[in-house]
Image (cartoon, rainbow, N blue to C red):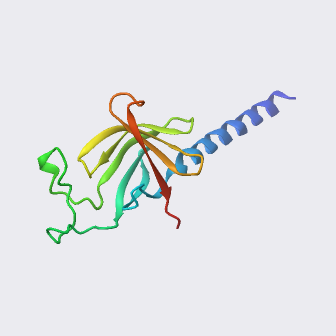
Amino acid sequence: MHMRTILTLSGILLVMSVFSQSQTADAILGKWLNEDQDAHVQIYKENGKYFGNIVWLKEPIDEVTGKPKLDDENEDETLQGRPVMGLIILKDFIYDGDGEWDDGTIYDPKNGKTYDCYMSFGEDKTLKIRGYIGISWIGRNTYWTRVEK
């Protein structure tokens, strides 16, 4: 082969691998139903990182107050008045190029705690979310399913 042909093929392969990696990285984008089936989380990309916010709640109204549910379990008292609807619960995930989104955190409004977290796809196309404290083998998994359009 001529050097020009080799360089052209190398360039094409490089572009294809970058394109396929971004396609894989963005596979997480969309709306997901949590394991308890009481919330939808929209995962989106911003400045190269992945985030997720609550866009639907099965029971958005607090039974006691008759008003929208608030983040009243948050350990930070200054945040307890914010609504759960719209809350960003997934933050700062980076795609590692190897099928995982990591270096992020997940916030659980049911207990007001934030955990280190990574995400990957399960064998059945579910989104496996592993929240943990400190080291990943001390934690728990939850599995979300994609909400079809």
**Rendered location of residue 102, percent (x, y):** 44, 37
Q: Residue at x 21, y 55 (%)?
A: 71
Q: Position of residue 13 (x, y in %)?
A: 71, 37
Where 54 sits versus 138, above or below? Answer: below
Q: Point out the image quarter for the N terminus.
A: top right
Count of numbered circles on the image? 0
Of residues 30 and 18, which is closer to you in this image? Answer: 30
The structure residue drawn at horizontal position 17% and vertical position 72%, both measured from the top left corner, is: 66
Residue 84 x %, y %: 26, 59
Residue nearer the viewer, 4 or 141: 141
Q: Is residue 86 left or right of residue 18?
A: left
Q: Residue drawn at (17%, 44%), measured in percent from left and top?
A: 75
Instruction: Say which of 84 and 50 sits in front.
Output: 84
In front: 27, or 74?
74
Q: Residue furthest right?
A: 1
Residue, far bottom: 66
Residue found at x 39% / y 48% = 51
Left or right: where 85 falls relative to 73? right
Q: Position of residue 15 (x, y in %)?
A: 66, 40
- In the image, is 7 to the left or to the right of 86? right
